[in-house]
Image (cartoon, rainbow, N blue to C red):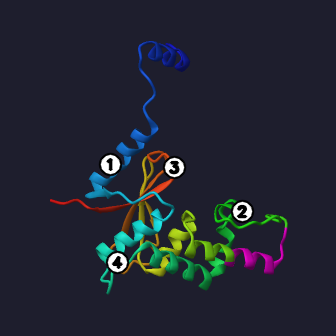
Amino acid sequence: MASIKQQVEEEAKRGWSQPDAAEVERLGISSMCCALGLSMYEIQPDGHCLYAAVADQLNLHQKVDRPTDYKATRQAAAKEMRTHPEQYKPFISDSDEQMAGIINPQAGTTNSEDAQDQHFQAYCHAVQNTAVWGGQPEILALSRAFRTPIHIVQAGVPVLKVGQEEFEDGRKPLFISYHRKMYGLGEHYNSLRPQLA
């Protein structure tokens, strides 16, 4: 039996190569979407993708007086985080602060409550007013702000269901997809809409 290294070398000689990671991810997400009766709606990769994807879902599923946009969802996430800082502060990392443009020369070295509060408030300001990327804490904040579960579809893992246990009152979940490899600029979110018949 040939070793894995030998098999790879033989395949390389024959012109076979490793599958493209972006294509593998695309196929994995497409397969899950098909099983869920969903199709991907492309969101512009501009730093607002999480918030724009959630806004698209809200516009599809919620009765809203006027269309929701990424600015409104950013504002809602920041407001939720400011209202309940104890539920979010522990999960904002130094790298999150750096991505938000917060200069924190004492990162990880100070236990000052005032310093932590100032950095958290600066982070919330960035969430609300800049194109800083959103992740797990912001998804939780959006779920709570709009009182609805958010399901995240990604390749190779089960659907991540944020807020599912909090909002078990029959609310229809919002569906978004999370991509690590499909976009050259890095991580990205898209909206997942019901497939048309």
**Residue at horizontal 40%, vertical 66%?**
53
**Marked residue nearer the N-terminal end (2 or 1):** 1
Helix, strand or loop under label 1: helix
> In which quadrant will I find the C terminus?
bottom left
Mark 3 and mark 4 residues within 8 Å of each other at the beta carbon: no
**Residue at horizontal 68%, vertical 59%?**
95
**Marked residue nearer the N-terminal end (1 or 4):** 1
Mark 4 and mark 2 residues within 8 Å of each other at the beta carbon: no
For disc 4, the neighbor class at 10 Å (few under 14, some 14 to 19, many from 20) is few
The residue singled out by tag 1 in the image is 30
The residue singled out by tag 2 in the image is 94
Q: Residue furthest left?
A: 197
Whole-percent x and y of residue 162? 47, 68
Mark 3 and mark 1 residues within 8 Å of each other at the beta carbon: no
Q: Magenta stretch mostly in which secondary structure?
A: helix
Q: Nearer the viewer, residue 69 or 112?
A: 69
Residues shaded magenta: 110-121
Whole-angstrom CA distance, mark 4 to mark 2, is 35 Å
- Is residue 107 shown to the viewer in this render? yes
**Residue at horizontal 58%, vertical 72%?**
127
Helix, strand or loop under label 3: loop
**Marked residue nearer the N-terminal end (4 or 2):** 2
Whole-angstrom CA distance, mark 1 to mark 4, is 24 Å
Q: Is residue 24 left or right of residue 77?
A: left
Residue 188 drawn above or below residue 131: above
Q: Is residue 93 left or right of residue 7?
A: right
Q: Amino acid at mark 4?
A: Arg
The residue singled out by tag 4 in the image is 171
**Residue at horizontal 40%, vertical 75%?**
69
Say which quarter of the image contains residue 112: bottom right
The residue singled out by tag 3 in the image is 185
For disc 3, the neighbor class at 10 Å (few under 14, some 14 to 19, many from 20) is few
